[in-house]
Amino acid sequence: MAWLALASLLVLAAPQPAAALDFATDPVSGYALGGNDPVAYFVDRKPRRGQQEHELRWRDTIWMFVNEGNRAAFEKAPRIYAPHLKGCDPTALAGGFVTIGNPSIFALHDGRLLLFHSEINRFLFLADPQTLLEGAHDSAERLGCAR
């Protein structure tokens, strides 16, 4: 019984992440996109790890950037650079369930950053993006993945 009380205290004392898992937030560090720069996906066409000296808090989540220019771009237009569907996998959403995307498995589609749980989901999405995106949007609000 004492171990249960101790375990409860440890859980309560543990640092809490900035947000649940919106925007593929790392549950340990609290960084969106696991610490990757959201603007880099558009500029460099690949994920790049941000630096702590260029971080910014937006929507109760901490975002990191590789430089001040990317930080400023995000600050001006966060909805453009933040993952669409709050980082939920659009293929899974189209199927009616929520899976948080992996910041390393992504696609840029119609000017939006989309994250996928797996390479297979990314492949399926790219085979029929319009249909799957429509299905994802239909489920997003109900499943907590709408902005």
Image (cartoon, grey):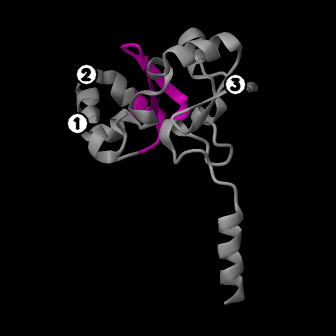
Residue type of the residue flagged with mark 2: Gln
Q: Secondary structure at mark 3?
A: loop
Q: Residue at x 66, y 10 (%)?
A: 69
The reply to whether the magenta stretch includes residue 106 is yes
Q: Which residue is mark 1?
A: 138
Is the C-beta separation of discs 3 and 1 under 8 Å? Answer: no
In percent of width and height, residue 131 lies at 23, 26
Mark 3 residue type? Gly
The picture places residue 108, in percent across and down from the top left corner, at: 44, 17
Q: Label 2 vs label 3: CA separation?
A: 31 Å
Residue position marked by numbered label 2 in the rendering: 130
Earlier in the chain: of badge 2 and badge 1, it is 2
The part of the image, by quadrant, that contains residue 50 is: top right
Where in the figure is residue 86, as x and y percent of width and height? 43, 34
Q: Quadrant of residue 84?
A: top left
Mark 3 lies on residue: 50
Q: Which label's residue is closer to the chain start, 3 or 1?
A: 3
Residue 26's x, y, as percent?
61, 42
Quadrant containing the N terminus in the rendered view: bottom right
Q: Are marks 2 and 1 in contact (CB under 8 Å)?
A: no
Residue 41 visible to an observer of this rendering: no
143 displayed left or right of 33: left
59 or 38: nearer the viewer: 59
